[in-house]
Image (cartoon, rainbow, N blue to C red):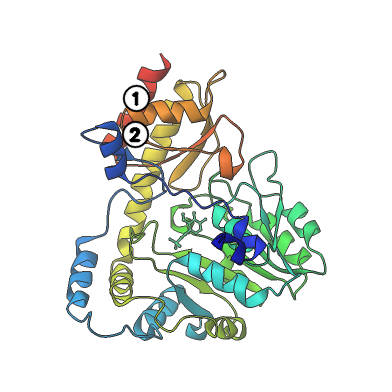
Amino acid sequence: MDLASLFRPGIRGIRPYTPGKPIEEVQRELGLVSVVKLASNENPEGPLPAVVEAVARAARDLNRYPDAACFALTRRLAAHLGVDPRGLILGNGSNEVIDMLIRALVSPGETVVFSERSFIVYALTTQAHFECGRPVPLGADDRHDLPAMAAAIDGTTKLVIVCAPNNPTGTYNTADEFRAFLAAVPGHVVVAVDEAYYEYVVAPDYPQTLGLLAAHPNLVVLRTFSKIHSLAGLRVGYGVGHPDLVGELHKTREPFNVNALSQAAALACLDHWDQVAGRRDRSREQLEWLARELAALGFVNVPSQTNFILTRTPAGRDAASLVEELLRKGVIVRPMGGPWGMDARALRISVGLPAENRRCIEALKEILV
Ligand SMILES: Cc1ncc(COP(=O)(O)O)c(C=O)c1O
């Protein structure tokens, strides 16, 4: 019996997400002693020692269910952000909050607008949920085309997702552009702005969206502890919005969606928020170094506000073969063709530790010259 045929057509049509290869697998496959992974936009610095200690302490109570309401974390995080705790929802990564929004808002026949060449989870999750995604082409400058996204909203649209800064391009839309976009979106359409890389941003004209919540009750801001806080392996993300909207979203949340270790770790991150600026600055310095070195090798970089850089190979080289050659030299980066749908020369490199970045550039030099 064809068990796949039991599933909804939308599920059968999904091309599964291929995550970056784990380091151990690449080592084993290629017989390499050391491998650097610059492929999943993680923080190479790792969690703070105080966070690891908090997790170890919390592990003693693993026989107990976690606090289903994330009481302490919600209050601390809301105070930190200066928002009403009733307007905050925590998720098993911000991924889960995206999933909750789509499942809670969209009935069969209704749609979700987002940009092409954006975080691939939007396409996958909407495909799984009644094929409700309506991707809009990315602008020619590798930025979201917000006017085109506003124009794509029709009577079926329930949700628009803006990725800011965008993964995989690292680009953003300015505060003025975002305000004009919000003004063009009808109040009954929810706008989710995915700010997974918010803490890495240095551009002064980047929109400060929490300040827009009061005037736009249809706005939800999504952030995460996965990136600058180095908790990708524990999965804690959150959404901030109007208490009435977030209250409805809570109804769709599984009772214990954020586990006990994750809650303890996120609380410890809040105790050490003063470390964020240093982490951002070190990442930025390395990003700028990588950009300079890549440009010197003939790559064409897209300006980035994140901990990764989208770049295009020198003329005559395609990204897929270059990425394969890099892999054989023990450096994992991501080609952006295939399911990401970008051109054949596009690849994404996540910022690593200085020695990892140097190794990537040295390997590229060996390949290209
Ligand atoms: C734009 C964007 N949003 C969300 C996420 C996922 O974040 P989380 O780990 O909180 O689920 C990522 C991770 O790569 C991302 O790039």
* Residue receiving disc 2: 331
Name the residue rendered at 49%, 64% in the picture. Answer: 95
Which image quarter holds the N terminus?
bottom right
Name the residue rendered at 69%, 55% in the picture. Answer: 177
Q: Which residue ends up furthest to the right in the rendered image?
A: 155
Relative to 186, 307 lies left or right: left
The location of residue 275, given as percent across then percent down, is: 30, 59
Name the residue rendered at 31%, 32% in the picture. Answer: 330
N-term mark: 1 or 2: 2
Distance (Cα) linking label 1 and label 2: 8 Å
Which image quarter holds the C terminus?
top left
Q: Does the residue labelled 2 lie within 8 Å of ligand 1?
A: no
Q: Quadrant of residue 274?
A: bottom left
The location of residue 259, given as percent across then percent down, is: 34, 76
Q: Which residue ends up furthest to the front in the rendered image?
A: 1
Name the residue rendered at 45%, 21% in the picture. Answer: 297
User: In terms of secondary structure, where does tag 1 sit?
Assistant: helix
The dot on residue 15 is: none
Relative to 308, 190 lies left or right: right
User: In terms of secondary structure, where does tag 2 sit?
Assistant: strand
Relative to 65, 196 lies left or right: right
The location of residue 130, given as percent across then percent down, is: 68, 66
The location of residue 3, given as percent across then percent down, is: 55, 62
* Residue receiving disc 1: 363
Residue 269 in the image: above or below residue 66: above
